Amino acid sequence: MINTRMAVCKARRYVVKIGSALLTNEGRGLDRAAIQGWVEQIVALRTAGIEVVLVSSGAVAEGMKRLGWQHRPVALHDLQAAAAVGQMGLVQAYESYFQQHQIQTAQILLTHDDLIHRKRYLNTRSTLRTLLALGVVPVINENDTVATDEIKLGDNDTLGALVAVLIEADLLVILTDQEGMYEADPRQCPEASLIRMAFADDPRLLSMAGAEGGALGRGGMITKVKAAARAGHAGTATLIAWGRKEQVLTRLAAGEEIGTLLLPTTATETARKQWLASHLRVRGRLYLDAGAVQAIREAGKSLLPVGVVSVSGEFQRGAMVSCLTPEGEEVARGLVNYSATETQRIAGLPSQRIVERLGYVDEPELIHRDNLVLV
Ligand code: GLU
């Protein structure tokens, strides 16, 4: 049993996504007892050394209850207003249950655009990594006031995948109101059997997934399969499981064969670096000294400002830049943490002196090794 679930047992960083249908008491607002149950399981995971980022829906449903609405409105602006009202109750519930275990939470509201825009991507990534390092549990939802992607389609399945890719999670757990994914829709074919394991990019999954979502949230299996494929491209495994199963999170972490596991076909590091190398245009050049070339090429280190001799091109934080030897040979490419103007000002300086020169520090590295690909 454990062998087939090796990817889950070894996972040390989870994104746990909880959908609206699970979080709400059949339309009567948030199911606080259920939330308390998941919080306790997440606390147990953390005690076992697993980092957890929560992606939680439920804002629209809680907002509808608070506003006394019986039926989900169709107008997007009504849904957005409900989400804004309900988000208050959602974070309040998580905060109070985590605080019973002396764990701090952080609210993060994101849009898909935030994760496509390079500068915001880096900002979000460094905030999330800092929160995890501080032992905080980030609670993420879509920023429904400014974006409507998940309200319209996804119920945060896509957002869960984007966050998993962003923080290089080992596992994306999508908790839902079904045991997992079936070969056919179990509401129409009660005989259909549960898929225990598959590759996330298996094209047959989409046709098996059917189409519809519930009345309270969007989603449905299709968006989950697409989310798993997206996560899989970055090397993250996805597990779809029934969120109300007793101790579902701690049991799956122990290797129990629960739900549907959708495995990535590429290793995380390779996937991420392939993506970096192929998807972005080079916006500038950094000429390095020999020491820096050696540090990144042979020792797998990050690029620090101290190793940069000169800078060319116009670029912003988050842009892809090329790193060259003093002779002009390209050694690496990566996402730069400072703009061209800032890089010029801190080139040659030890990282402790960035603050003195700029008045602030984004990162001690000019390019973090996770965002650097050797050429
Ligand atoms: N972000 C939304 C929420 O938290 C998505 C779910 C929905 O559309 O109901 O409520």
Image (spheres, helix red, strand yellow):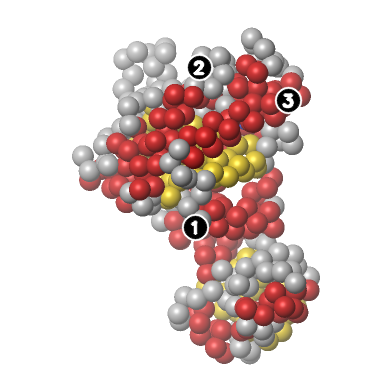
Q: Residue at x 22, y 43 (%)?
A: 2
Alpha carbon of mark 1 to alpha carbon of mark 2: how far? 34 Å
Q: Is residue 278 above or below residue 330?
A: above
Indicate if the residue with disc 3 has its beta carbon within 8 Å of ligand 1: no
- Report which residue position mark 3 lands on: 81
Figure quarter occupied by ligand 1: top right
Task: Name which quarter of the figure residue 43 lies in.
Answer: top left
Q: Residue at x 52, y 35 (%)?
A: 96
Disc nearest the viewer among 3 and 1: 1
Around disc 1, counting alpha carbons within 10 Å, would you say few (fewer than 14), some (14 to 19), or many (20 or more)?
few
Quadrant the C terminus occupies: bottom right
In the rendered view, does 164 fall on the left or right side of 178?
Answer: right
Query: What is the x, y in percent for residue 121?
Result: 64, 54
Q: Amino acid at mark 3?
A: Ala
Around disc 2, counting alpha carbons within 10 Å, would you say few (fewer than 14), some (14 to 19), or many (20 or more)?
some
Label located before the other in sequence (3 or 1): 3
- Report which residue position mark 1 lands on: 133
Label located before the other in sequence (1 or 2): 2
Label located before the other in sequence (3 or 2): 2
258 or 325: which is nearer to us?
Answer: 258
- Is any atom of residue 1 visible in this view? yes
Query: What is the x, y in percent for residue 353?
Result: 67, 80
- Is any atom of residue 285 visible in this view? no
- Report which residue position mark 2 lands on: 25
Alpha carbon of mark 3 to alpha carbon of mark 2: how far? 20 Å
